Amino acid sequence: MEKIRFVTRKIEFRSLLLIFSLVLIMSIMAACGDNDSQSAESASGADTASVTKTTPVTSTATSAPQPTATSIPTATATVIPTTNTEISADQSLPVTVINADGSEVTVKDTSKIVVLTGDYAEIVFALGLGDSVIAVDTSATFPPEATARPKIGYQRSLSAEGILAFEPTLLIGSTEAGPPEVLDQIAQAGVPVVIFETEPTIEGSADKIRKIANALGVKSVGEQVATAMESEVEEAKTLAATAQGMPPTAVFVYMRGVDTLLMAGIGDISADLFDNAGAISGGVKAGVFGFAPLTAEALVTASPDYIVVFESGLESVNGIEGMLEIPGIAQTPAGKNEAIVAFDGQYFAGGGPRTGKALKDLVLVLHPELNN
């Protein structure tokens, strides 16, 4: 904006009177023009004015309702929903599905979805129904739009009152969500609750996408998303097959500070990822089922060339230097070479639409010669 410089000088009385008259006339004309403009806005844009007052987001879509429970934090970031009108047009409801406990649930309305687990949130957004998601749990870290949604707490320690405050038309999540009595209370309140059990493998990830899509009435879209993921997985496996030499050994270690150190093995998705990446799971080699406390003895048996961790886990032990102080780590080939690889947790182990991309990244890390 240009700076306006005011110069004071003496003005004769007649000149001043003339200027005053001109200013008065111009003010009257401007007032008439403003009234005309405001009348035009009232006639043609009353709805826009209403939305501007009630919707503090940068989207024309209706904003998600906020919970009335004061104990539940709400997102402060601007919500920018992803809209897909083609997917909405392809949606077919009602749909009846079988829950993990064998009960039947009929989904009739997906306009206000609360997603209970982070991997499911990513999938719901990938299916094009992100606009309908009104709340997620704290494990939802992707996409950014999901992270910006109001939070219901952590998936394993949910509150019925907090969730019901959102007035949802559907809850959906995995068997990781709970406690069960909270989900039962919400179902008894008349809200459909869809809970699926997922096999912790790459194949199970594709099946999960298809089951969620079917429950949301977008089966054909789910097939497209799952097929695309499977195609990326096959590309990564083909790349891994070109690696030369002995397959490396890799271990996935879950960390939440030095007091929570667990090695993953049989039954964790990391074992399937390592296998498809042309590597040996050190946890499987050490005979670990699921997760077991990380011990120096188990590390000696596993003898990993690479140790894979979550970024948040590595941060919780003060980085690589802190990790090397954990008993047994520094004595492994991975520790000696500081071959410690950190991934975003949901990206690596979420079993979502990005699984094929995560597998390819893993292949390139475990077989560095393929980067050339």
Image (cartoon, rainbow, N blue to C red):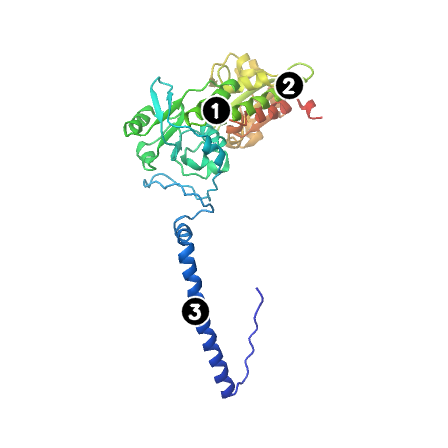
Could you tell me how far apart the alpha carbons at marks 3 and 2 are, in whole angstroms?
A: 74 Å
Looking at the image, is mark 2 or mark 1 earlier in the sequence?
1
Q: Which residue is mark 1?
A: 209
Label 1 CA crowd tier, 10 Å (few <14, some 14–19, many 20+): many
Label 2 CA crowd tier, 10 Å (few <14, some 14–19, many 20+): some
Pointer 1 with pointer 3, Cβ within 8 A: no
Q: Which residue is mark 2?
A: 238
Q: Nearer the viewer, mark 3 or mark 2?
A: 3
Q: Residue at x 51, y 11 (%)?
A: 287
Looking at the image, is mark 3 or mark 2 earlier in the sequence?
3
Dot 3 falls on a residue whose secondary structure is helix
Could you tell me how far apart the alpha carbons at marks 2 and 1 are, in whole angstroms?
A: 23 Å
Query: To which quarter of the image does residue 331 belong?
Result: top right
Could you tell me residue 168's position as x and y percent? 35, 34
Comparing 267 with 185, the one in front is: 185
Q: Residue at x 44, y 62 (%)?
A: 37
Three-letter amino acid code of the residue under disc 3 = Cys
Q: Nearer the viewer, mark 2 or mark 1?
A: 1
Q: Residue at x 32, y 30 (%)?
A: 191
Q: Which residue is mark 3?
A: 32
